[in-house]
Image: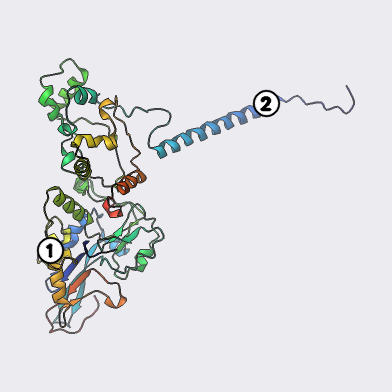
Amino acid sequence: MVTADSNKWGMVVDVDRCTGCQGCVVACQSENNIPINLEEHFNQRRAIQWIRIERYWEGEYPDVKARFIPVMCQHCGNAPCEPVCPVYATYHNNEGMNVQVYNRCIGTRFCANGCPYHVRFFNFWEPEWPESLKNQLNPDVTVRSRGIMEKCSFCVQRIQRSTRESERDNEVLEDGDRGLNPACVNACATNALTFGNFNDPDSKVSKMKEEAMKEGGRGYRLMENLGTDTNVVYLKKVDESVEVTHGH
Amino acid sequence: MIPGDFQPQKPTGTQLAKLGVLGVVLLGVFIGIVLVLTFVISSWLGRPVIFGHDGPDQPIEFPHETHVKELGMDCTFCHRNVEKEAAASVPAAGLCMTCHSAVGDELEGITKMRNLYEDGRSIHWVRVHRVPDHVHFVHEAHIRYFSEKEGIEAQEVCATCHGDVASMDKVQQNRSLKMGDCVNCHKQNNAPTDCATCHY
């Protein structure tokens, strides 16, 4: 259970700032030992991207605008992926995170079917890296073998490490600490992503959420009508000149 | 001979041969089953049940007894990261050379170590304690907790899991280090039992 005194990790994504540069995707890929996605993987719809940039075109030629939305695991409060797992390999921990336990997973893929955001990925193959990249693997993250699900973990290894190091050095873990932030947040060139503790009313994300969710604010959450109670808040594009949204 | 009395037939040569082959095959199957069971039980217990109680052979016979008991060195003198980081770390040969450039000339292991050091190569120690890749054990947090709780030095904490390494001829695993072992201890000490504490 998420209690008032525990942390509740969450993210605020400012879509207005996102330039679609894919920096977060690359950072995530290298931080979390995600195997390299080749063209054939994308063609088979089996590419693994814990965070992806969805691209939408707005307007009619010649007045076309590209719109980008970074989508990662929303860490739902009412996660549709959790109750369907027969082995409790995915569950909610007391820090508001949706955790995937690799060693429990047996690969039924029910959770991927349940997820409305398409952010859960199945390892169809044993992960492989070219010889030159073997030494760049992150020792803090498990290399997932064939046959199990994986997804964005909010870089839980960084949260664990920075929490432990702040305890070791008798320091208070600061909001927005670069050691605490997930790799995507650190990599974002335009600060479109902000990570922090929603249970701390003074944290940056709490203030942004409060501001955004006010009447007339820019805040929204992906597929809010599903009642998934996500921990990721999006701030919509400021430019109101273009109304029509086409598919990507 | 009474009429109708049962007279066992003498087995022919081929029958005897078949019986012999069957016997050998069954014996082979039996030995196979025993071997497989030995491996299964060994892997479940995490140590060999028939051979190799002693722990693995190391490339250089490092006597913990001499260094710890006789010379009174701390565990943390060589395993330098144990109070700071996740891995306890095994030192490079350079640390050995701080003393052994001067002492231990007559010993075979020292000569071997010096040669490796001069060639700039590392000693390939055989790892004794190993948890699976999906488990992230952090030495620093455990040492910190126990030394604060019980008010003892870091090196006394080591024995909780590693046993009395100083008296071991060859270093061997002392506890099962399976998940049940970890979780039991975590429960006793009110440590978190959330999966994401160790598995990520």
- Residue at figure coordinates x 13%, y 56% from the top left: A173
Q: Which mark is residue A120?
A: none
Q: Secondary structure at mark 2?
A: helix
Dot 2, crowdedness within 10 Å: few (<14), some or many (≥20)?
few
Residue at image mark 2: B16
**Colouring rule applied to residues:** rainbow
Could one spot residue B166 in this view of the protein?
A: yes
Same chain shared by disc 2 and disc 1 = no
Element at label 1: loop
**Disc 1 marks which amino acid?**
Cys
Horizontal relation, residue A219 to residue B171: left or right: left
Q: Looking at the image, which is closer to me, A156 or A123?
A: A156
Residue at image point 12% right, 48% down: A169
The chain under label 1 reads A
Disc 1 designates what residue? A188
Q: Who's the residue at 27% across and 25% down the image?
A: B167
Residue A49, position as x, y percentages in the image: 25, 61
Q: What is the chain letter for disc 2? A: B
Callout 1 environment at 10 Å: few (<14), some (14 to 19), or many (20+)?
Answer: many
